[in-house]
Amino acid sequence: MRAVLLGPPGAGKGTQAVRLVERYNVPQISTGDIFRKNIKEGTELGRKAQEYMNSGQLVPDELVVDLVKDRLLKDDCKNGYLLDGFPRTIFQAEQLDKFLEEQGQQLDAVINFEVGYDTLIARLTGRRVCKSCGASYHVVNMPPKTEGLCDRCGGELEQRKDDTKETAVNRISVYEESTAPLIDYYSKTGALKNFDGETDPDQLLEEIVSVIGE
Ligand code: AMP
């Protein structure tokens, strides 16, 4: 299965990705996670991406496209993958199409989550992530058993720098301007499948599977 997760920040792409990779046994390719890892490790790419990310802007296309292409050529992507957070611009989508054509492949689905503005803000500002393993929580919707600590590994929870109210608002408007046009782009190819991103995550998984197939 080759699929793209589409939707504004806070739509639940990451939450659903965890479920989908288990169901379909394909890797999750999250460009945001790749950048955060690079920032943590202090690489050149991380240094370049950091400023854009902290202010809620998109990292320039030229830093993203080759990175994703290289990743998709790795062995574990042979039977498919789930793209989470890529493409985010029309240019990125066109580059992905070109790459797929070269490989003689095509996307099976573009899974688009629709979520209201107030829900997005509440989800983003309440999100907490584990510093060690990256597991995601929410102060109201999904609190950890012990406040401030990860259920899975006991690591310390923190708020992502770009999940503050101001940056969250900015990220949503960047989404509207640069990424939302992809809905139209993919509806023309017939790959687009729309879902209500406010549905309970486990139920949503079943709805997605029933639409895109086992
Ligand atoms: P995410 O974890 O998907 O919310 O991404 C966090 C941040 O990483 C975004 O706000 C962007 O600054 C950057 N980023 C992730 N994916 C991309 C992409 N495909 N194109 C440009 N910037 C990206």
Image (cartoon, helix red, strand yellow):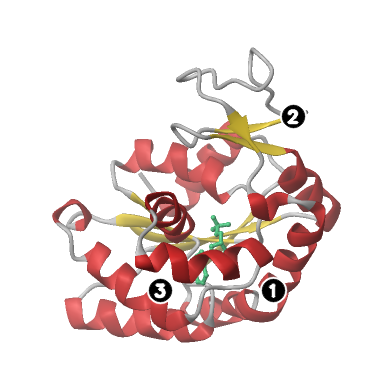
Identified by mark 2, the residue type is Val
SS category of the residue bearing label 2: loop
Q: Which residue is mark 3?
A: 64
Give the residue drawn at x 81%, y 59%: 166
Give the residue drawn at x 48%, y 75%: 190
Tell me how many marks there are.
Answer: 3
- Please tell me which of labels 1 and 3 falls first in the chain: 3
How far across and down, in percent of the image, does residue 65 sit? 37, 77
Residue closest to the eye, 11 or 161: 161
Q: Residues within 10 Å of mark 3 (few under 14, many from 20)?
A: many
Q: Is mark 2 within 8 Å of ligand 1?
A: no
Residue closest to the eye, 132 or 144: 132
- Please tell me which of labels 2 and 3 falls first in the chain: 3
Q: Which residue is mark 2?
A: 139
Is residue 196 toward the left or the right of residue 26 in the image? right
Whether 155 is drawn above or below 125: the answer is above
